[in-house]
Amino acid sequence: MMFGGDFLNPHIDNSHDANREKCRRLNLLFYVSPDWKLENGGNFELWDNKVAFPKTIISKFNRLVVMETNKQSFHSVCPVLTSKPRCCISNYYFQKNSPYGKEYFHVTSFTGRPNEAVKRVFGKIDNLARNIISRNLKIGRGKNKMNK
C-alpha cells in the first residue's frame, strides 16, 4: 500500500530468496485500488536497460502485471499524487536453477531517474558496497535466515 507522496526509484529486485536457494524469476503485481487513473500517480514504470526511458503502466483496478525478474529488469513506481491509497498485491515466483546457467547473486539495487545524476552515482556506490558486504559477511537485512 502506498500513500500520497510515496514512490519507488528505479531498481532491480534482489536475485534470490532469503536462503539463497532459489532464484527470483517472476514478479506478479495485482492492482486493487478502485477507479485508479493515470493522473493519480503511483503507476508502475518498466525501464530500458540504461534506465533512460520508462514504459508507464497504469496501476488500474483488477490489472495484473507479470514481470520477469533479472539483472536488467529495472522498474519503479512514480509518486502517488492523490490522497487515496494505491493498493497492490505482489507475488514472487522462484526457480531452483539460475536463468544464466551459472550461479550469481545481487541485492536489491537502486538508481536515480534520468535527471538524477547524483542519485545514479550514489546508487552505484551503495549497491556495490551492499553486494560486497552481503556476499562476504553473509549478512542481510535483518532476516534471521538471510544469506546463511
Image (tube, grey):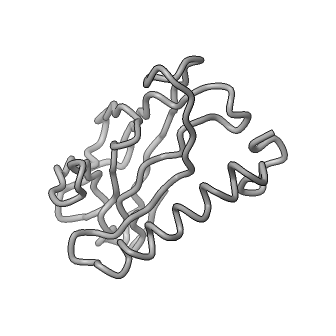
Across and down, in percent, residue 7 comes to: 39, 66
Which of the two residues, 105 or 144, is positioned nearer the viewer here? 105
The image quarter in which residue 145 lies: top right
Across and down, in percent, residue 48 comes to: 20, 49
Residue found at x 59% / y 35%: 16
Which of the two residues, 8 or 137, is positioned nearer the viewer here? 137
Using the image, determine if residue 104 lies above or below residue 119. above
The image quarter in which residue 83 lies: bottom left
> How many marks are shown on the rendered structure?
0
Residue found at x 43% / y 29%: 26
- Is 39 placed left or right of 143 in the picture? left
Residue found at x 55% / y 24%: 94
**Residue lying at the far bottom of the rendered structure:** 118
Which of the two residues, 40 or 10, is positioned nearer the viewer here? 10
Using the image, determine if residue 13 lies above or below residue 2. above
Residue found at x 77% / y 48%: 138
**Residue lying at the far right of the rendered structure:** 144
- Is 78 placed left or right of 22 in the picture? left
- Is 82 placed left or right of 122 in the picture? left
Split into 4 quadrants, where in the image is the C terminus? top right
Across and down, in percent, residue 120 comes to: 35, 72
